[in-house]
Image (cartoon, rainbow, N blue to C red):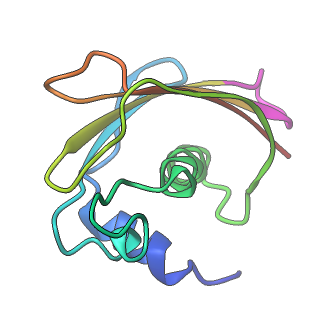
Amino acid sequence: MSEPSYIQQQLMQRMSPLEKLGDGVYSTSICFDQDFPGFEGHFPGRPIVPALCLLSVVEIVVRQSSGLSELRFSEIKNMKFKVPLEPGDVATFMVRIDNGGELPFIANATVSTEKHAEVSKIRLAFG
C-alpha cells in the first residue's frame, strides 16, 4: 500500500468523519485554516486552495467509502470552479459515487461553503 503524500495527510487530518447520506452519497467537511501547507506558494499575496487539493479530497472520500485504499482517479471528466477557497474557509464536499458495484467508479462532487452554495463541481473516473 502506498503512503499518502504530505498534503493528503494534512487534508485527512482536517477532514470531518465521512458521513453516509444515502446509497452512494457521502459528505465531509474540511477547514482550510491559515496553517494549511497547500497555501504555500499558491499564490503569494492571495492564497487559494489548489485544485489538486479538491481532487485529493474527492479521491480520499471514494477510497474511504469503497474500502479500496489503493484506488486513484484515472480521469478528470469535468471540473468547474465558481469561487476560490481561501484561508479560513470551511468547505463541504457532497460526493455521489456511481459504480454499480464494479470498477470504474464515477464520482460526482459538489463543493460548497456557508457563503457559497456551489464553489466547484468535480466529476472523476476511478479504476
Majority SS type along the magenta span: loop
Residue shown at 39% from the left, 54% from the top: 49
Front one among 26 and 40: 40
Residue 52, visible in the rendered structure? yes
Residue 42 position, x and y percent, is 43, 66
Q: Is residue 82 above or below residue 15?
A: above
Residue 69 position, x and y percent, is 64, 64
Q: Quadrant of residue 107?
A: top right
Q: Quadrant of residue 108?
A: top right
Horizontally, residue 116 falls left or right of residue 123, namely left
Residue shown at 61% from the left, 84% from the top: 3
Residue 110, visible in the rendered structure? no
Front one among 62 and 52: 52
Residue 26 position, x and y percent, is 42, 30
Give the extent of the magenta segment. Answer: 98-105
Residue shown at 56% from the left, 78% from the top: 4
Q: Residue furthest front?
A: 45
